[in-house]
């Protein structure tokens, strides 16, 4: 089994809010006649492993616990979505997602081993959204600055999704500089990719 170590107490708070939100969402829309879609753009393995702190002096052993990640949380809500799409670049994590798909064999689950930006922009460009048949939630939970602003713009155009984007504010702050003329090119590229831009250029604010 591929273990996925990430997060901490704040992650549980975040995922608990997600669980409640998804639960309200599918219940609220259940009688509106929409086909409900859940897209986990950075799905991970569906679980997360955490090591609980120990006090060796008191003969305590380190304890490993496995908790539900966003993909499992979305599948375990009371009133399910009609279709699930899990996107993940790491092939070991994809294997774990496939095990989840086998476990939930009565649920429609599609798994894409690809870059979320590519999959989402392609999906968003399909001429299906104007028929007002679909509604959904896209959960975007990257480690860092992997999400392109163009991806967000493509989602907006569908007018069909609620988006949860855990924005990498610390990543952006790390790349930023007081004087943008001294900023390295690769940092500029990273920032331009994930922030609002006009004609391929980011707007720097001069003090
Ligand atoms: C913070 S983890 C996601 C955790 C997951 N949401 C959960 O709650 O269990 C981010 C995941 O995104 C994957 N990833 C990184 N870049 C990606 C990309 N461009 N497209 C899709 N997945 C990506 C990583 O392999 C990692 O598993």
Image: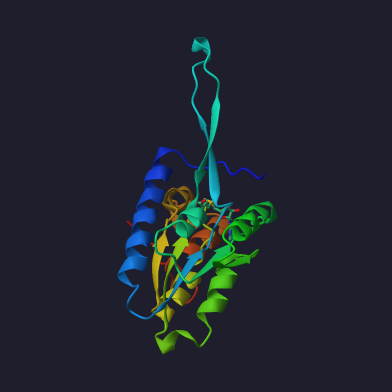
* Near-viewer residue (19 or 112): 19
Q: Position of residue 167 (x, y in %)?
A: 42, 56
Q: How many marks?
A: 0
| Residue that extends furthest to the top in the rendered view of this protein | 57
Compared with 45, 162 (above or below) is below
Compared with 179, 63 (above or below) is above
Residue visible at 39% across and 54% down in the picture = 19
Q: Is residue 33 visible?
A: yes
Ligand 1's image quarter is bottom right
* Near-viewer residue (26 or 54): 26
* Near-viewer residue (180 or 32): 32
Compared with 66, 207 (above or below) is below
Residue visible at 39% across and 42% down in the picture = 10
Quarter of image, res 131? bottom left
Residue visible at 50% across and 21% down in the picture = 54
Q: Is residue 206 visible?
A: no
- Horizontal side of 2 relative to 109 (left or right) equals right
- Horizontal side of 71 relative to 20 (left or right) equals right
- Horizontal side of 151 relative to 19 (left or right) equals right
Q: Position of residue 21 (x, y in %)?
A: 34, 59
Compared with 120, 171 (above or below) is above
Q: Position of residue 105 (x, y in %)?
A: 59, 63
């Amino acid at each position: 089994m591929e273990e996925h170590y990430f997060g901490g107490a704040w992650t549980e708070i975040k995922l608990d809010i997600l669980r409640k939100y998804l639960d309200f969402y599918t219940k609220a829309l259940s009688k509106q006649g929409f086909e409900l879609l859940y897209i986990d753009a950075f799905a991970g393995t569906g679980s997360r492993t955490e090591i609980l702190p120990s006090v060796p002096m008191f003969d305590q052993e380190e304890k490993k616990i496995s908790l539900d990640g966003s993909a499992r949380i979305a599948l375990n809500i009371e009133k399910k979505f009609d279709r699930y799409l899990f996107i993940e670049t790491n092939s070991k994590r994809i294997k774990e997602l496939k095990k989840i798909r086998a476990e939930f064999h009565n649920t429609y689950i599609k798994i894409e081993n690809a870059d979320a930006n590519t999959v989402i922009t392609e999906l968003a460009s399909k001429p299906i959204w104007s028929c007002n048949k679909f509604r959904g939630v896209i959960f975007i939970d990257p480690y860092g600055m992997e999400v392109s602003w163009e991806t967000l713009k493509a989602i907006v155009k569908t007018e069909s999704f609620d988006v949860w984007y855990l924005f990498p504010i610390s990543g952006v702050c790390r790349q930023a500089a007081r004087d943008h003329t001294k900023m390295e090119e690769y940092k500029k590229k990273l920032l331009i990719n994930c922030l609002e831009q006009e004609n391929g250029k980011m707007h720097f604010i001069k003090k």
